Image (cartoon, rainbow, N blue to C red):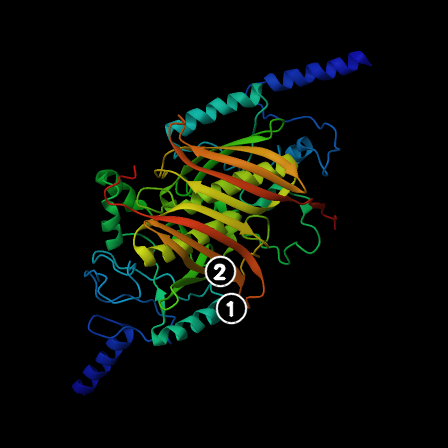
Amino acid sequence: MLRSCVSRLRTLAVQRGLPGGAPLPAKDPWSPRVNPGAGRRERAAKPGCVRGDPRSFSSEVMHMDLSLPNPSWSEDMRLLFDQFMKKSEDGSWKHLPSYKSKFTQETEDIKIYFPDAKLMKEKLSQAQLFPRSLEEGLGFEYAMFHNCVEDRTVCIFQGGPYLQGVPGFLHGGAIATMIDATLGTCAVVAIGVAMTASLNISFKRPIPLGSVVVINSQVDKVEGRKLFLSCNIRSVDEKTVYSEATSLFVKLDPKTRLT
Amino acid sequence: MIRRGFQAVIRLGHHRVLPGAPHVLPRLNRTSAFGSSTDSLVSRFCLEKTDLKDYALPNASWCPDMLNLYQEFLEKTKTDGWIKLPSFKSNRDHIQGLKLPFGLAATSDKSDWRIFTRCLQVEGQGYEYVIFFHPSKKKSICLFQPGPYLEGAPGFAHGGSLATMMDETFSKTAYLAGEGLFTLSLNIRFKNLIPVGSLAVLNVDVEKIEDQKLYMSCIAQSRDQQRVYAKSSGVFLQLQLEEELSQ
């Protein structure tokens, strides 16, 4: 009897992704995922794909990956997510996790650009990454996927009721925020820590509140530390173009202070 | 007749001088190139008698810079023709009795919708801001203090939050200056980062109104104007709201 209990527990550990067990299979999106391998930063040892790896985090804080389905996601959103997860199975696409706060190794890297450590520590304790600071379903519900082969990032986005602009539609600023976040992710994956220098957005049609849209972004050109990116926002069936944007991101130079 | 007209002017004069009194412009001529005049738009937008909570008022989270500049502009609402815009939880509250033209109106009317810039309601957490509008100069000033939940780079406001504040200020200015409703384009050049909890002053001007479009420019800088945070331009589409039919 003991032997069967132990084997059952081991199976459970595997299913729940506890240390020593394998991560949850992609087909079970409803359980919150905890990334294994706490504490150790995975340097860009993986060839090709993601160089500025946003996945690494510190061992002190447990994180919930917020770019996973939750009850507030609509049918459209869940279908799209599943489609992309399927595409990720062969390694050409990669799901990028997203956390509430930036207590990550990435923060350690960024700190050298902002040497005012004391001020930062105080602020960091209350800070939340802007697009993740609203409760489930009320604000930004999104997940990002990166295509390693074509070097582009796709974000599936569902805007909640607290993102209102003109009644019934998404606020232009909320759209700008998601464009900035998607282009920023695309830039970081391409060249590491980078900041927005300029954003140029053209709004074609208003986006209804609660609907799901797809943001396709790509790197157009690299000139030294400058990165030119563009993106468009389309409906799920790709027939409606809601917005188009171009931007310039700049790779941070460790020698230059930003403040 | 002249005496009556003169008395009306004196009454107006008294009204403007009263300390602490909300500044309301009289309804002047209704006709303009596009629908309603700025003054009628302002008086409808700035509901005086209302139970709605106005979020554009000082609270404990406002930094000293913000409080001081707020007081300065409050004085200007009495003497220089500036108006402090109220800020309600939802844009729907600002346009009571009006609706989007047929075909654009939302099919479901959910009461839990909130305007994005008032999505975080704990004082000091998200957007702390107030907009002052000058009807005849067609310009606005927005005092903006980003909270810790608007973070991007550690200790600094997310680029998207400044883009949002610029879009929001453009939006209110466009609406009151000429019934601008939807953003057509936004072009932002970021220069410096805004530290979380500090004051950024956004100056918006209407450059021109042409072909059913409003063109505006904005510069966001520190209070002493020594540090420019970003410059932007925005174009809005003019679209007249319709009266809601009473049921």
Image quarter of residue B145: top left
Closer to the camera in the image, B90 or A49: A49
Image quarter of residue A21: bottom left
Q: Which residue is mark 2?
A: A158
Q: Which residue is mark 1?
A: A76
Question: So how many labels did they put on this image?
Answer: 2
* Residue at the extreme front of the image, as rendered: A223
Q: CA distance from mark 1 to mark 2?
A: 9 Å
* Residue A175 in picture, x, y percent from top left: 49, 52
Circles 1, 2 touching at the beta carbon (< 8 Å): yes
Q: Report the side of A197 relative to A8 (left or right).
A: right
* Residue B132 in picture, x, y percent from top left: 53, 30
- Which label was assigned to residue A243? none
* Residue at the extreme top of the image, as rendered: B3
Q: Secondary structure at mark 1?
A: helix
Q: Amino acid at mark 2?
A: Gln
Image quarter of residue B162: top left
Mark 1 surroundings within 10 Å by alpha-carbon count, few (fewer than 14), some (14 through 19), many (20 or more): some
Q: Is residue A8 above or below residue B214?
A: below
* Residue B154 in picture, x, y percent from top left: 30, 45
Q: Quadrant of the C terminus of chain A?
A: top left
Q: Quadrant of the N terminus of chain A?
A: bottom left
Mark 2 surroundings within 10 Å by alpha-carbon count, few (fewer than 14), some (14 through 19), many (20 or more): many
Name the chain letter of the residue that bears numbered label 1.
Answer: A
Q: Is residue B183 above or below residue B42?
A: below
Closer to the camera in the image, A101 or A217: A217
Q: Amino acid at mark 1?
A: Asp
Closer to the camera in the image, A58 or B16: A58
| Residue at image location 35% in from the left, 70% down from the top | A31
